[in-house]
Image: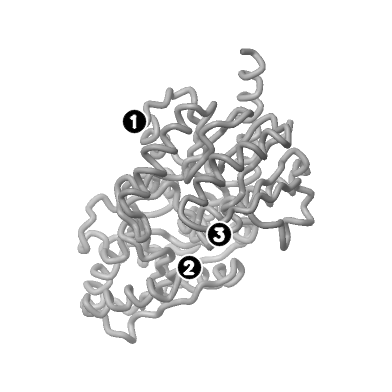
Amino acid sequence: MKVALICDLLDGGPSGMRTALEGFLRAVARSARPDMFELIRSKPLGGEWKDHGFGEMVIPRGRGLGSGLCWSQLKVPRAVKLMGAHLVHSPWQVLPPVRTSAPLVVSIWDLAPLAYREPGWDSASVVGKYEIILRLAVKKCCHVITHSRSTAEEVIRRFGVPRHKVSTIYPGLDEVFEKEAELPSRPNPEGPILYVGSNTPRKNLGLLLRAFAILAGRGVPNNLGIRIGFGEREAARAGDAARAAGIPAERIEFLKPARRTEMVQIYNSAAALAFPSLYEGFGLPLIEAMACGLPVVALHRSAMPEVVGDAGILVNDDSPEAFAQGIVEAIGLSRSDGTRTATRAKARAASFRWATAVRKTISVYEQVCKRTRAR
């Protein structure tokens, strides 16, 4: 079986979806199955990927208005036909090809732009990419993969996809964090309350800042550590919001983007992870933090209950007071029951493995190809 995997995510900037695709490909390489994949990219393979045995087809994207649409809807289908692929998989939801000569599988991480206006997502872009292209692709594709049950239910509800055409396959831990989950440790109760993510509206950083202002006013000694992953402008806006919330400058530290091994050190220095997001298709920082033994605090929304399970604190009320209380409880776990808390968190994180995700994804491919041959 030859699978055309659309990998333009690797050609862009950092994101959780890119991190997940890289984790998937590393697991494929470890499983000795890279020869079944032909990676479609807009740039030549580089770095670690060129040595893993993947096939490659480079299709220049071009520039200007409509270049992405032309690349995904015209150039990619031609490439799929030329390579004679048995199946094509678009591993994220932005501009999957609507018409291909091979059966199409589409992965949908989330449908956040339909509910939240993130920077760079104007109304016309959202309508074009989600309400038109994605809706058509989902209607015509053979199978949809989501990374949480909550996203699966949303896809079924919004797009009217038959339930039997949707599979939930959870992503896994990066190999660095997978190794960390196997090591004994305990959180640092004197360390910072950690936030890892971007500063966009649905990430809801403002809730954490208001909650931390309450904690600082009550004399909680832990500082707040914020790691904004996507640029200085977002960090500057977060700094302005922190000052507006009345947080003293000496109580907050902005951490620079870091490599995976450095992120392990950052997690290991913390007392807890605070994750105030309103909506997630999964939430990779949650399993990364738990792999390092941290208690996590998150809102009881979207995919968070599926990911956290009983290994963290889920807050039903999205008020600053309720979230502040959740953080207090998490720090209390770090201080009074750190070893047991870390053991439970690590066990939860270790249940999310890329080897399992790869095996289930290939099973979907096989089922799709079998159904197609039977027609």
| Circle 1: element type | helix
Mark drawn on residue 157: 1
Q: Which residue occupies 20% across, 59% down?
A: 319
Q: Quadrant of the C terminus?
A: top right
- Between disc 2 and disc 1, whose residue precedes? 1
- Give neighbour class at mark 2: few <14, some 14-19, many 20+ (Cα, 10 Å): many
- Between disc 3 and disc 1, whose residue precedes? 3
Q: Quadrant of the N terminus?
A: top right
Three-letter code, disc 3: Gly
Foreground: disc 3 or disc 1? 3
Q: Which residue occupies 43% across, 49% down?
A: 308
- Compared across the picture, whether 50 is left or right of 296 comes to right
Residue 84, position in %: x, y?
A: 73, 32
Mark drawn on residue 187: 2
- Between disc 2 and disc 3, whose residue precedes? 3
- Give neighbour class at mark 1: few <14, some 14-19, many 20+ (Cα, 10 Å): few
Among the 4 quarters of the image, the one containing residue 74: top right
Residue 306, placed above or below residue 215: above
Residue 81, placed above or below residue 278: above
Among the 4 quarters of the image, the one containing residue 253: bottom left
Three-letter code, disc 2: Pro
**Nearer-the-camera pick, 372 or 310:** 372
**Nearer-the-camera pick, 249 or 80:** 80
| Circle 3: element type | loop
The colour scheme applied to this rendered structure is one colour
- Compared across the picture, whether 148 is left or right of 223 comes to right
Foreground: disc 2 or disc 1? 1
- Where does label 3 land, which residue? 12
- Mark pair 2, 3: CA separation: 34 Å
Three-letter code, disc 1: Arg
